[in-house]
Amino acid sequence: MRIAANNFRWALVTSMCTAALLTGCVGLTASQKTAVGRLGEASAKLGPASSAQLALIRDNVIQMNLEALMLQGPGFPSKPGEPPPSIVPSELDKNLSADAVATIGAATNAITAYGEALVALVDDTQSANVKSAAATFASSLRSVPGSRLTTEQATAIGDAVESVGGFLVEAKRKKAVDTLVLNARSSVDSICALLVTTFDPEADKSAGVVLRSAILSVSIPAHRTFAHANTYQKRKEAELGLKLAFDNEVRRTHDLVKVKQAAKAMKSANDALVAAMQDAKWSMDDVLDFSEKVKSLQDAVHRSMNKGS
């Protein structure tokens, strides 16, 4: 009996050691875990920060168009170099409608879910959180043109995260990370490109150009009102328009650029992560750079919100 018990203990210890050895061999390395975790955290923050910035832009476009309408009146004549009097009360959000914002919102939701899935895969013991984030990522992409996962990609990601948990956890987590990162790469690239274009201060039909148009619409009548006023009270009528134009030009040339830079950095960081998971030559610098740019973007959003913009 004693010999049998000892043999059983020895077999159990041997099995556990073998499992640990196998897990260590096929699991994520320390550097891979760091890369996955840092990129995941930054991605999860980029989504809300970008979404908040877009909401601020839309709110300010509406406010500037309304102020321009109040200053210029319904029959404001255009002069050479001035935009046509196209602002009407029913189109204060012209060129930046709720539907357009919703599409970008789906993209930022997808980026957030992608980051949360990566973080959960390296830090979270609850496999349900991984599955939830992966499902949100896939569903959000359905509302983003050109970024939807193929059936094969969605199935591969779903199967991989479904297997997380149980025996040889580290091996399964490594496989799930590999599958998510590789199959999501094209979608992540598309979303990053969409954010770069949307928040470009000069790109055609971007939020930056819509913002610039609203700035011109309010600054021209505001400057005219100020120039023609001969009393403090009359000049006071131009105050809101002048302030809106100034604050939003700062937003257009500084804050929007931060979103664009962060989106570009995310693509580079995700490329580096793909290389890391494939054991190719890669650098952690891209991931760290992305993390810093997202922090800068968050600071800009917080400043804008604290100003009551």
Image (cartoon, helix red, strand yellow):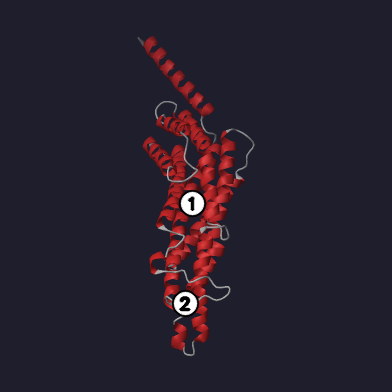
- Give the labeled residue for mark 1: 46
Circle nearer the viewer, 2 or 1: 2
Can you give x and y, in whole percent of width and height, for residue 254 in the image?
56, 63
Whether residue 293 is visible, yes or no, is no
Whether residue 136 is visible, yes or no, is yes
Earlier sequence position, callout 2 versus callout 1: 1
Residue closest to the far bottom: 230
**Image quarter for residue 67?**
bottom left
Front one among 217 and 50: 217
Q: Secondary structure at mark 1?
A: helix
Front one among 89 and 35: 89
Q: CA distance from mark 2 to mark 1?
A: 41 Å
Can you give x and y, in whole percent of width and height, for residue 245 in the image?
50, 72
For label 2, the crowd category at 10 Å Cα-Cα, with few meaning under 14, some 14 to 19 and many 20 or more, is: some
Q: Amino acid at mark 2?
A: Phe
For label 1, the crowd category at 10 Å Cα-Cα, with few meaning under 14, some 14 to 19 and many 20 or more, is: many
Can you give x and y, in whole percent of width and height, for residue 53 in the image?
47, 59
Total numbered labels placed on residues in the image: 2
**Above-or-below relation of 93 to 39:** below
Indicate left or right for 134 with 36 as reference: left
**Image quarter for residue 151?**
top left
Front one among 209 and 304: 209
- Give the labeled residue for mark 2: 76
**Above-or-below relation of 245 to 260:** below
- Work out which quarter of the rendered image holds the C terminus and state it: bottom left
Q: Residue at x 46, y 69 (%)?
A: 86
Q: Amino acid at mark 1?
A: Leu
Q: Residue at x 41, y 52 (%)?
A: 102
Q: Which mark is residue 265?
A: none
Q: Secondary structure at mark 2?
A: loop
Can you give x and y, in whole percent of width and height, for residue 150 in the image?
47, 35
Front one among 21 and 116: 116
